Image (cartoon, helix red, strand yellow):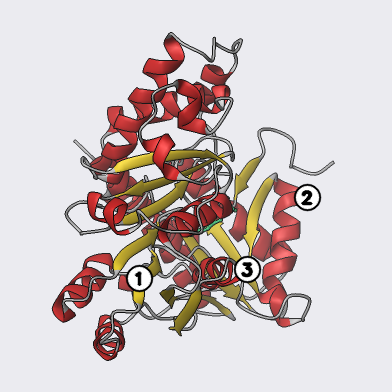
Amino acid sequence: MTLANGRSYLAIPGPSAMPDRVLRAMHQAAPNIYEGEIETLAASIVEDLKYVAQGPQAHVAIYISNGHGAWEAANSNMFSRGDTALVLATGRFGLGWADHARSMGVDVEVIDFGLKSAADPVQLEATLRKDTGHKIKAVMVTHIDTATTVRNDIPAMRAAIDAVGHPALLAVDCIASLGCEPFKMQDWGVDIMVAASQKGLMVPPGLGLVWASDKAIAACRDADLRTPYWDWTPRMNPEFVYQYFGGTSPTHHLFGLRESLDMIKEEGLDAIWARHKTLARAVWAAFDTWGAQGDISLNLANDASLRGSSVTAARIGNGGAERLRKWLETQAGVTLGIGLGMAEPGTKEADDFLRVAHMGHVNAHMTLGVLATIEAGLQALDIPHGPGGVAAAAAVVAAHTVA
Ligand SMILES: *Cc1c(COP(=O)(O)O)cnc(C)c1O
């Protein structure tokens, strides 16, 4: 007899909440996969993916995969065995992309900026300056690292590469940021970008997405890690529909993505980015207020400029995070994300971390609902916390009022 019945809410960083419009669009018979509607559907999705990435001249490849598949797709098209990659890691996801590349035969150098700071353009510039032979083929960085929730300054990375005149490609993992956080592939000089369907794009997991600039296509023409499935060439230049997808089309994911892209265009990127920013600030205000009198803190407690606006990582000491997560799920129908990469898995410390996602199809009532439920959980579990967290979040939402 808990209070968990009703519509459950998965507030984890992917899969994100799926709009009813997206689910309804998927609820239909499969189309002819050889010709007709599917051809215009695929072509229109490619066009709108360029809009969402703000990369009007980008080439787009769509894979039936999750984000890990998108990593592998980018790696296999970018690199030849023995090439060097420079990874700027700011959490578990940067390190994960590095591991993938290494296990594929790429010589990976990692600059690890730890769990509480962004990639430093000065260090990037210094590292590239030492690479006088231009062995580094690509600089890989995560826009928002979903584990630490650090947001990296992508234009600053481009500027560092350009300051040295180094030919390295700039490759960015936007899986946790696309459709949530401002991103401008073309203006920011990004060469390769990866994303996936189940975060800001609001579609079930199952599509991995890669964008490449003309420069990237030219620089990677001879990459020998390419295999038939991951090769982006036919996907970016299809003569027949099956070439978009290396086989049968992901028909229903395409229906869902078509609908979500329509929703994104209707709202507009500027409004979407502003919505995410305010909802993130509401979450931060609540945690800062609770933390004023208790062992509760944001991972990036001291510098809001480092925080991504799609997901928030926090610490509640003495195993409070794990107890709170369990309480929310069993008593209130809300599932929060686990902490990732913040402590050794399986240790006592690992129970001190959680993440709250606010990405994609989220509005004020969903976010305030999660926060009020967290506050109820803190009370129920006798976890010491400062009063007024929900009120602080409500004030942030109130201030956003649009005429
Ligand atoms: C979710 C995520 C991934 C991994 O995506 P999967 O779909 O789980 O394979 C990679 N990078 C970032 C930044 C992510 O948020």
Quarter in which the N terminus is drawn: top right
Task: Pick the residue in front: 242 or 7.
Answer: 242
> Which residue carries the number 1 mark?
137
> Which residue carries the number 2 mark?
330
At label 2, the amino acid type is: Thr
Tell me: is circle 3 under 8 Å from ligand 1: no
Cα separation between marks 3 and 1: 32 Å
Cα separation between marks 2 and 1: 49 Å
What is the crowding at mark 1: few (fewer than 14 residues within 10 Å), some, or many (at least 20)?
many
At label 1, the amino acid type is: Lys
Q: Is residue 155 above or below residue 176?
A: below
Task: Pick the residue in front: 205 or 304.
Answer: 205
Residue 52 x, y percent position in the rendering: 31, 40
Q: Quadrant of residue 68?
A: bottom right
Mark 2 element type: helix
Task: Give whichever of discs 3 and 2 has the lower sequence position.
Answer: 2
Mark 1 element type: strand
The answer to whether any part of residue 16 appears in the image is yes
Left or right: 262 in relation to 359? left
